[in-house]
């Protein structure tokens, strides 16, 4: 009996299970090596890859990275398949077969150059291709950057056919294989819908709601974890926000970074306390930028002009350039400028008082001295100036604001991050050092409050100037080690350190009187300084119980210290005062997950995870006096929640249809609530408990060669279950700013035109149901709304043209609502201030890539 026959007999005799994927013809065996030596020295010529899967000889970039990916794949598979047993592992072979080599797509009128550009948008970390080894190199996971999409039919086909690779679990994995509720929006999709800021795409994300008072005044909620409008209050947000590796959440107000040259946006629903820590109570939002590439000089330039109803002309320009300085050093720079005319008028007759001017840029330098070491230094800056909030005062739907003085707003953001990735063979060691600096200055209209104080004789003036400043800086260091390979045991372990300083400053003086240098010469002066230091360790372990069943457990232990020093001065509070307070706590946030894959394109999972948010102080508040109805106390405790969910993901018909669904229940206790005491001062207390139950559904489909359809529907039932003594609310009351139903859908038709062109038309509709504005004795209702957008595009060669209409039906939506009670011009008033969306905007965009 010959050798191969004896081996087959031996397998049968020992009961060894045969692979579901037989070894393909043409793939030869090699001698066994050590894991570190596995794959070393394998050039493309020595790899026994069947001819129909080989890259063309005229493409050295593809040849180099196919060989590199194969070497990486050989090492990754060493624990499960003896190294060299298959020089090109048969799992990768069938994966590549599934996705058709990109140079074979020419028969479908897909230009090779466009597909190669897409491929070259891949990010190579630590010298290895992101996910799936050689399959990724062959185009299975390529993304074109936002604002720089490819320019022919490949763009439309890839948006559905392309697998999305995410790093939400601190390792690279297919979106379909990640056993948590996550939605990823690629750079192509962001550009397709014309997304420039958060609100442009947020309504299309299942489980996400938000409060939008204009640029830089966003507050994001996920899965109904909301206590209402807490912008500029000093507490932590319930959603963590990251730009690449840098956490940029500052207080409860999340910065609105413009979405230019973006690889993807990842939205992680449910608490992410294990890997992302405090402040990720409801979820985490990650914006991932495109990184420098070594393969080519490339660039992009886009000009956009538009006109807004009830406003004026708008303009924007953005671009990026990628320059490899050598085969080890590359630089990527992006820059943008935006001017929006505004659409809110002053009651006195001034037009377009909420005009916006924003400019910014990003610079990244990448250094790869050896294949296993990758160093990236990134800096970003953005400066936004607006004339007023996007609010109408008691005149809705008329876009008019009642104010006695200008209320300008300026928001400056700067970040720096140094990321180092070292491939150790068995795992990847990552160090991320971040610096974040945000400085906001604005004026606030409080004439209704000053008028009331003047009416009762407390102050001698009724119109005033209230100026506020919110500088914040943070320094973050994270080190983590994640296992490599696809063996049955996978792990991530790491440490985290945060040092953050926030400041809230305010002066109040009669109208026309600027802030005084001496603190006591102001009618009211406040300087409130917050400090936070956190040290944490975390780990997450996964083990394949069978080929289909995986168990995951993780935990994060954090020690946080917060301090507050509040200085007040001026005659309003009786002179100088200095009060300080401290708060510290140790928290543990565990996570448990069990996932099952009935097929390679399907996933079922159940999960329980805890979220946590640190408490704080109410230092320096004056004692309850005239009008004070709620005594908040000197401090408030941390709040936490448990999230229980079950989910499913599957893809059928060769990925023509992808469906993701999840159902969840959240038990939230010690809710941190910002309340007005009734005397003009606010403070925090723990309001009680809440239960949130809901379901999320996402669908993406390709219908034939020309049609694409997608959408999401979300149901969220978020109510209070118990209320602490003194809180002006009742059990059963809905949580604020969260609709019971919201949904979004898009439909696109596209087809090739000419020799290298592609034309398309896309419509988007977004619906948000009715909500309430606050946890209070009499919460105000906020109406539901639906918005419709339309875009026509033509890509031809290196040029892109598009005609777009946003809010095409000119719907004036209520995004938020507050009520101000007081005295204005000597008359008692009760004013509604309603945050509104941008009216109908029609525009044209022209872009060129090179």
Image (cartoon, grey):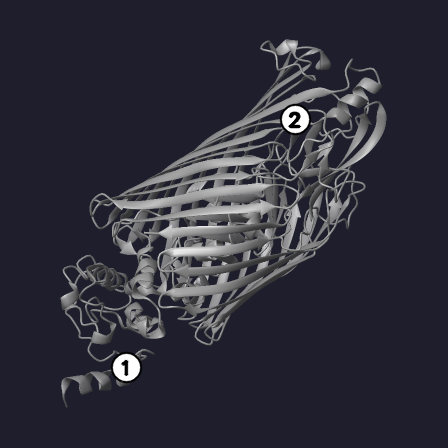
Q: Which residue is mark 1?
A: 14
Q: Nearer the viewer, residue 616 or 756?
A: 756
Left or right: residue 241 versus residue 752 is right
Check the image and name the residue furthest to the bottom: 1
Horizontal side of residue 826 vs 508, given as left or right: right
For residue 33, which quarter of the picture?
bottom left
Percent across and percent down for residue 278 are 53, 41
Q: Which mark is residue 704?
A: none
Marks 2 and 1 in Cβ contact (< 8 Å): no
Observer able to see residue 135: no
Q: Is residue 27 left or right of residue 788?
A: left
Q: Residue at coordinates 20% horizontally, 45% vertically from top-left? A: 326
- Assign a secondary structure to mark 1: helix
Q: Tell which of 18 and 716 is nearer to you.
A: 716
Closer to the chain start, of discs 2 and 1, is 1
Residue 666 visible? The answer is: yes
What residue appears at the point 20 percent right and 57 percent down from the top-left corner? 36
Is 563 located above or below residue 845 in the figure?
Answer: above
The percent position of residue 147, horizontal first and vertical second, equals: 43, 51
The image shows a total of numbered marks equal to: 2
Q: Residues within 10 Å of mark 2 (few under 14, many from 20)?
A: some
Q: Residues within 10 Å of mark 1 (few under 14, many from 20)?
A: few
The residue at 39%/64% (across/down) is: 757
For label 2, the residue is 406
Task: Pinpoint residue 651: horizontal percent, then vertical percent.
Answer: 48, 71
Question: Residue 643 sits in which quadrant?
Answer: bottom right
- Helix, strand or loop for disc 2: loop
Q: Could you say where residue 610 lies in the image, as x and y percent from the top left?
A: 56, 49
Q: Nearer the viewer, residue 500 or 765?
A: 765
């Amino acid at each position: 009996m010959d050798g191969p026959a004896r081996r087959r007999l031996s397998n049968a005799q020992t009961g060894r299970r045969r692979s579901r994927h037989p070894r393909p013809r043409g793939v030869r065996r090699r001698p066994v090596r050590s894991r570190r030596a596995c794959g070393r020295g394998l050039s493309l010529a020595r790899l026994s890859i069947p001819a129909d899967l080989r890259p063309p000889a005229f493409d050295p970039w593809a040849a180099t990275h196919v060989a590199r990916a194969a070497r990486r794949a050989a090492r990754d598979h060493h624990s499960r398949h003896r190294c060299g047993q298959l020089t090109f592992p048969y799992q990768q072979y069938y994966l590549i077969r599934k996705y058709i080599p990109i140079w074979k797509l020419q028969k479908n009128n897909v230009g090779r150059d466009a597909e190669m550009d897409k491929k070259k948008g891949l990010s190579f970390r630590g010298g290895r291709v992101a996910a799936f080894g050689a399959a990724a190199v062959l185009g299975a996971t390529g993304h074109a950057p936002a604002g720089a999409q490819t320019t022919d039919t490949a763009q439309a086909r890839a948006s559905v056919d392309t697998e999305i690779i995410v790093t939400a679990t601190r390792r690279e994995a297919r979106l379909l294989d990640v056993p948590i509720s996550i939605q990823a929006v690629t750079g192509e999709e962001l550009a397709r819908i014309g997304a420039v800021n958060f609100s442009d795409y947020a309504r299309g994300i299942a489980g996400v709601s938000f409060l939008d008072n204009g640029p830089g005044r966003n507050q994001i909620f996920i899965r109904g974890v909301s206590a209402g409008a807490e912008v500029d209050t000093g507490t932590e947000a319930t959603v963590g926000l990251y730009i690449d590796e840098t956490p940029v959440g500052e207080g409860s107000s999340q910065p609105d970074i413009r979405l230019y040259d973006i690889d993807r946006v990842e939205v992680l629903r449910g608490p992410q306390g294990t890997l992302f820590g405090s402040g990720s109570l409801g979820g985490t939002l990650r914006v991932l930028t495109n990184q420098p590439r070594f393969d080519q000089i490339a660039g992009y330039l886009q000009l956009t002009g538009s006109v807004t109803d009830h406003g004026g002309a708008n303009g924007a320009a953005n671009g990026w350039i990628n320059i490899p300085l050598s085969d080890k050093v590359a630089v990527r720079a992006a820059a943008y400028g935006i001017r929006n005319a505004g659409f809110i008028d002053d009651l006195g007759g001034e037009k377009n008082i909420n005009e916006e001017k924003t400019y910014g840029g990003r610079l990244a330098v990448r250094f790869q001295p050896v294949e296993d070491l990758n160093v990236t230094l990134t800096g970003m800056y953005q400066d936004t100036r607006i004339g007023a909030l996007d609010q109408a005062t008691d005149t809705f739907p008329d876009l008019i604001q009642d104010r006695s003085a200008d209320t300008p707003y300026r928001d400056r953001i700067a970040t720096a991050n140094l990321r180092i990735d070292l491939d150790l063979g068995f795992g990847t060691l990552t160090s991320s050092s971040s610096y974040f600096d945000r400085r906001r200055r604005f004026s606030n209209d409080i004439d209704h409050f000053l008028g009331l104080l003047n009416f009762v004789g407390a102050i001698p003036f009724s119109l005033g100037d209230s100026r506020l400043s919110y500088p914040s800086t943070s320094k973050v260091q994270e080190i983590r080690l994640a296992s490599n390979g696809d063996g049955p045991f996978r792990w991530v372990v790491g440490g985290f350190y945060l040092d953050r300083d926030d400041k809230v400053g305010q002066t109040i003086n009669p109208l026309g009187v600027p802030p005084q240098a001496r603190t006591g010469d102001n009618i009211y002066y406040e300087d409130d300084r917050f400090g936070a230091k956190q040290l944490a360790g975390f780990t997450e372990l996964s083990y394949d119980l069978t080929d289909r069943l995986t168990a995951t457990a993780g935990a994060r232990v954090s020690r946080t210290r917060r301090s507050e020093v509040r200085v007040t001065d001026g005659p309003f509070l009786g002179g100088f005062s200095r009060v300080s307070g401290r708060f510290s706590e140790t928290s543990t946030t565990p996570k448990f997950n069990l996932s099952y894959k009935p097929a390679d394109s399907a996933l079922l999972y159940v999960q329980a995870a805890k979220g946590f948010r640190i408490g704080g102080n109410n230092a320096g508040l004056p004692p309850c006096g005239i009008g004070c109805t709620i005594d908040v106390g000197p401090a408030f405790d941390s709040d936490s929640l448990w999230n229980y969910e079950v989910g499913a993901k599957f893809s059928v018909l060769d990925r023509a249809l992808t469906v993701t669904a999840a159902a969840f229940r959240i038990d939230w206790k010690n809710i941190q609530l910002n309340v007005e005491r009734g005397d003009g001062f606010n403070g925090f207390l723990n309001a009680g408990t809440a239960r949130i139950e809901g379901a999320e559904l996402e669908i993406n489909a390709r219908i034939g060669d020309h049609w694409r359809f997608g959408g999401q529907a979300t149901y969220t039932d978020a109510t209070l279950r118990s209320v602490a003594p003194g809180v002006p609310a009742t059990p059963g009351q809905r949580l604020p700013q969260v609709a019971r139903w919201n949904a979004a859908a898009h439909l696109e038709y596209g087809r090739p035109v000419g020799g290298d062109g592609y034309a398309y038309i896309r419509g988007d509709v977004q619906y948000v149901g009715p909500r309430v504005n606050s946890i209070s004795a009499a919460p105000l209702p906020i109406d539901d709304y639906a918005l419709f957008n339309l875009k026509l595009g033509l890509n031809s060669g290196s040029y892109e043209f598009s005609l777009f209409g946003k809010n095409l039906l000119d719907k004036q939506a209520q995004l938020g609502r507050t009520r101000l009670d007081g005295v204005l011009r000597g008359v008692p008033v009760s004013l509604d201030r309603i945050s509104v969306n941008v009216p109908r905007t029609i525009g044209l965009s022209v872009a060129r890539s090179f």
